[in-house]
Amino acid sequence: MSLIVRGGRILDANAHADSGRPADLRVADGLITHVVEPGRELPAADQELDASDCVVTSGFVDLHVHLREPGREESETIETGSRAAAKGGFTAVIAMPNTEPPHDSRIVVDFVREQGRRAGLCEVVPSGCITMDRAGERLAPFAELQAAGVHLFTDDGSGVQDAQLMRRALEYSRDLGVTLAQHCEVVSLTVGAVMHEGSCCSRLGLPGWPALAEELMVHRDIELCRLTGAGMHFLHLSTARSVELVRAAKADGLAITAEVAPHHFSLTDELLSGFDPVFKVNPPLRTPADIAALKEGLADGTIDAIATDHAPHAERLKEQPLDQAPPGMLGLETALGVSLTELVDTGLMTLRQVVAALSWNPARIARLADRHGRPVSVGEPANLTVFDPTATWEVDPSTLASRSRNTPYRGRVLRGRVRHTIYEGVAVVVDGEAIQ
Ligand code: DOR
């Protein structure tokens, strides 16, 4: 299988100029075989992809997706989620462990990986649970899961509440050389909460999720990292103070990384005024001041990665009253458009900075940098995304590849769209459509 990508501009980890460098490239048997000046002759190939007006970059890596299989296939399957990922330009996704059963045994992580292989649209990399059954009581078998190819451990959906257990998990992860990723939420502060605790929530008379519930755990874990010498990753940060805490920890030299989800830097708690569960998410949508701080954190490198927290929920579930509907929103197919619209169009970040946060930074955090987020050069694995940074499109839930419809961006016009995605040398998305 060989293909040529013609007419684009390469923007990769080695690029200096933000506009990228014009080049054509050829891929064969999973590897990049040629990168040449535009229009130069290339050996024939089975397929040719038009990349005019497009950026050609290393594929995106999503540190945070819920694919629902096994157990809740009504909302998503590994195949439908992989298709949504490929359409969003992702060549690798980290599958969160809150499935039924959860990712606390070898048999489940092997199953998830294998289903990903079967779908063949992107690399589905299972995370492992920090604790058995994500119950926060006993550590999961890290070494056994690591032997099965797990490099990132999290109880996402919940945070590890017990500080002593978290200390042991950090020591263990430090010694094994795996990444620990925390969902920061002190649950005693969020019982019954449906939205951000603030003036909007008081006006609506709804139980609130205070910023402090996140920040207390961020603070505790930073101090546990200082104590143990371990590093860790913070999932879906949502508040201004969390960004400040991470900025200070990094300045102290701690090996901390952090991610933010597109919905947290583009949507505010005011959207809950209509009581529409599509805007319910955990952690919740926050205030304009939090949004400004999250964007600032991305722009100055305090936040390393943009991760979607893609959380599909079947219509039947999401259409329940606000207090009963599950939290979560789709993210894979809109991540690039929301990021470019909110961060690049506004002049806050360069295109290269945003691509770094979507590709090579998360590849490094997930320990996938041997095959994702690589330079676009000869001999490298062909995991690539070709996107048009200026194309505008309107989000229509009925056209999404996900099995669920819970996008908070219905009707929004976004700028920036994926044209082709190449995974292991195969064009799995061509002209915006998945091939299978
Ligand atoms: O909104 C969320 N949905 N946050 C989480 O942490 C879990 C996720 C889910 O699994 O639906």
Image: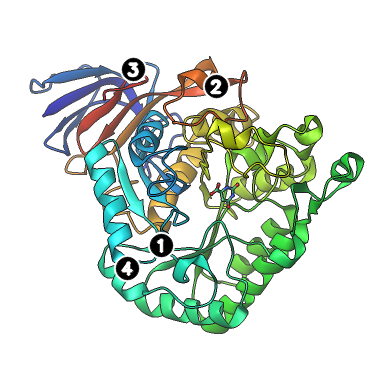
Residue occupying the point 30% across, 35% down: 384
Q: Nearer the viewer, mark 4 or mark 2?
A: 4
Q: Nearer the viewer, mark 3 or mark 4?
A: 4
Secondary structure of the residue carrying numbered label 3: loop
Which amino acid does the dot numbered 2 rest on? Arg
Q: Position of residue 366 (x, y in %)?
A: 39, 57
Q: Is mark 2 within 8 Å of ligand 1?
A: no
Which amino acid does the dot numbered 4 rest on? Leu
Q: CA distance from mark 1 to mark 2?
A: 32 Å
Q: Quadrant of residue 178?
A: bottom left
Q: Which quadrant, please, contains the C terminus?
A: top left
Secondary structure of the residue carrying numbered label 4: helix
Mark 3 — residue?
A: 431
Mark 1 — residue?
A: 152
Q: Is mark 3 within 8 Å of ligand 1?
A: no
Secondary structure of the residue carrying numbered label 1: strand
Q: Nearer the viewer, mark 2 or mark 3?
A: 3
Is 220 or 5 nearer to us in this picture? 220
Q: CA distance from mark 4 to mark 2?
A: 40 Å
Q: CA distance from mark 2 to mark 3?
A: 16 Å
The mark that comes first in sequence, 4 or 1, is 4
Q: Quadrant of residue 344?
A: top right
Q: Is mark 4 within 8 Å of ligand 1?
A: no
Mark 4 — residue?
A: 145
Q: Is mark 1 within 8 Å of ligand 1?
A: no
Colour scheme of the picture: rainbow
Which amino acid does the dot numbered 1 rest on? Leu
Which amino acid does the dot numbered 3 rest on? Asp
Is 261 or 98 nearer to us in this picture? 98
Q: CA distance from mark 3 to mark 4?
A: 38 Å
Residue occupying the point 68% across, 41% down: 280
